[in-house]
Amino acid sequence: MRHRLFVAIRLPEAIIDMLLLLEGGIDGARWQGEGQLHLTLRFVGEIEAWQAEDLSQALASIHADPFDLALRGVGHFESKGRPHTLWAGLAPSEPLLALERRVESACRRAALPPESRRFSPHITLARLNAASGPLLPFLQAHGTLASPPWRVEAFDLMESTLRPEGALYETVRRYRLAE
């Protein structure tokens, strides 16, 4: 059996509520639901059950202290000049970057291919397509987005099930950070 997995930091309810209030104002955008808002540390993709178990064990060996994160600004990713993802950014965080490097190392110990994309910490707010409305009003209205810091005390191995109405994300295993 194959599993579509990724490693993520789940967001506290107050941050999810703040992000949900931003949603709207862009025709054709597919906004992320409450259960879809997260910070991806590493997308794994589809792997066999035995590989998922190896990954789970490798992730369990990660040691890191809890740390704080905060939202900072909004932006978008594009390909060939066309926006495809609207996101909320995060304040710079060396502990977050260190955790991402440890997750990548665990993936390699589990014999997964290395990540080819540079880590760009963000929380996806909406998926866009060629029919989506203009982004500039949204970006101008929310460019100064900022949140109080929140404490990151764990990260999760998540499974993604693709459905017509959007992906369903479920925690496979939670890994606590300890001081």
Image: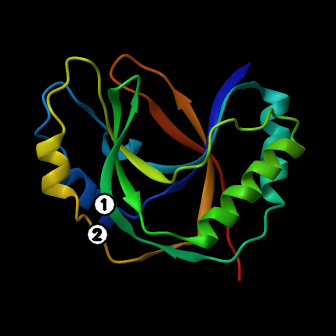
The answer to whether the residues at label 2 and label 1 have Cβ atoms under 8 Å apart is: yes
Residue type, mark 2 in image:
Ala
Camera-side residue: 140 or 106? 140
Where residue 133 appears, as percent x and y from the top left, is: 14, 28
Helix, strand or loop for disc 1: strand
Spatial separation of the CA atoms under disc 2 and disc 1? 6 Å
- Residue annotated with mark 2: 146
- Residue annotated with mark 1: 73
Where residue 32 appears, as percent x and y from the top left, is: 32, 38
Question: Relative to 158, is 129 on the left or the right?
Answer: left
Q: What colour scheme governs how the chains and residues are painted in the rendered image of this protein? A: rainbow
Where residue 91 appears, as percent x and y from the top left, is: 43, 69
Give above or below for 115 relative to 129. below
- Where residue 1 sits, quadrant-wise, is top right
Residue type, mark 1 in image:
Gly
Identify the residue at horizontal 40%, vertical 77% (top origin): 149
Query: In terms of sequence position, does the residue under pointer 2 or pointer 1 come before the other?
Result: 1
Identify the residue at horizontal 30%, vertical 67% (top origin): 14
- On-image quarter of the C terminus: bottom right
Give above or below for 170 relative to 17. above
